Amino acid sequence: MNWLSQVIAVTAVAVRSIPQRLGSATVAVIGIAGVVIVFTAVLSIAEGFRAAMRGTGDPQTVIVMRSGSDTEMTSGFSGEHARLITEAPGVERGPGGVHASPELFVIIAVPLKRSGTDANVPLRGLSPIALNVRPQVRINEGRMFQPGTSEIVVGRAASRQFSNLSVGSTVRSGKTSWQVVGIFDAAGSVAESELWCDARVLQSLYQRGNSYQSVYLRLESADALQKLKDALTTDPRLNVTVIREPDYYAQQSQVLQSIIRTIGTGIAVLMGLGAIFGAVNTMYSAVAGRTREIATLRALGFGRSPVVVSVLVESLVLSLVGGAIGGLLAWAAFDGYQTATMNWQSFSQVAFAFAVTPALLMQGLTYAAIMGLFGGLLPAIRAARLPVVTALRQL
């Protein structure tokens, strides 16, 4: 009998005998499923945050900030410089004028719905033409704020996560009361975590004078970026950096993604070690229960390597079953779950949804397979080294 035929025969017997060891097999499956649930749930936070940040913006929209600034919080320039930026070539123009919005970005405290504790929420001051710069934004409830008033519109995600952000409610920040007049949808992007108001009103309240932190521009075409960048960076009156909106928000997500992935991987590795020990115990029990069977096969001329492969395959089958169960439970429990976390680069809360993606589920299955192979390795070696004569005496 050739080697492959031996492997198939021994493996088939091993897999068919799993129901006879249902108790120990179930323990191994549950252990690996638990690890995969935690692994997938933690990393789905990073995936959801990344999706919210990367889904923000349009390649035809650019952000202009002071040179050397990595966020709007650290940027700033005068109203005159903002005017020069809006007049640059390559910017889209329409019946209402140039599609450019000089903006301010501040942080206010708003209570979270679940805990009631205050969270840092972005309050963005922009110009009335800002919706022409962001064509993906739609006012779904209420209306846009009136310029010159203390009215605000809030993102859909912010209205779900924070208190007092429904149409008609009032938000207090210091001595100012903001009236919520509308809720906007931005296709699930990070913009939905923000509150928007009139930039002139925000300048007055925060004593900013005639200054801004960024200018959002709508390009006349997606390939007009270089023309705009050349005009702005060669103007001796300006010291600015120009970046596409999607690229800017993708950079904003890197710090938190790194933190979550590092923590999540560490937790998964520690739990995985426990699952491997559980799999080792399970497979040792399986080998002990199959001592006579293995000895008989060896006496009939079966080699050691087919026995090793059969034990590894049995361990792999149990781990993949556990991984599949864990992945499905994680998807059912966490995919789409709404939450908010801190963006460590802007120090403001970002509302987003957990994302259990197919790629993440495949990572979970791969991790389960690795745990199963490591868990079955030592028992497989023991089975292969089992003395035939000693084992046959148990018949």
Image: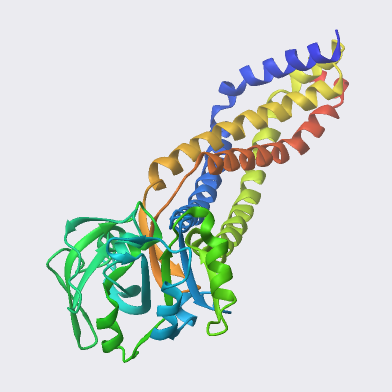
Residue sitting farthest toward the left:
168
> Colour scheme in the image?
rainbow
Quarter of image, res 376: top right
Q: Kindly tell me whether residue 137 is visible in this rendering.
A: yes
Q: Quadrant of the N terminus?
A: top right
Q: Quadrant of the C terminus?
A: top right
Height in image: 295 above or below 101?
above
Please report the residue visible at 45 percent of the width from the left and 83 percent of the height from the top. Answer: 81
User: How many marks overall?
Assistant: 0
Q: Position of residue 331 (x, y in %)?
A: 43, 41
Compare residues 97 and 101 and report the one nearer the observer: 97
Please report the residue visible at 52 percent of the width from the left and 66 percent of the height from the top. Answer: 228
Q: Position of residue 357 (x, y in %)?
A: 49, 43
User: Residue 52 vs residue 241: left or right?
Assistant: left
Height in image: 314 above or below 50?
above
Q: Position of residue 94 (x, y in %)?
A: 32, 60
Height in image: 217 above or below 236?
above
Please report the residue visible at 81 percent of the width from the left and 21 percent of the height from the top. Answer: 306
Residue sitting farthest toward the top:
1
Compare residues 333 and 78 and report the one nearer the observer: 78
User: Residue 393 vs residue 342: left or right?
Assistant: right
Q: Kindly tell me whether residue 42 is visible in this rendering.
A: no
User: Residue 286 vs residue 38: left or right?
Assistant: right
Q: Position of residue 34 (x, y in %)?
A: 52, 45
User: Residue 156 vs residue 226: left or right?
Assistant: left
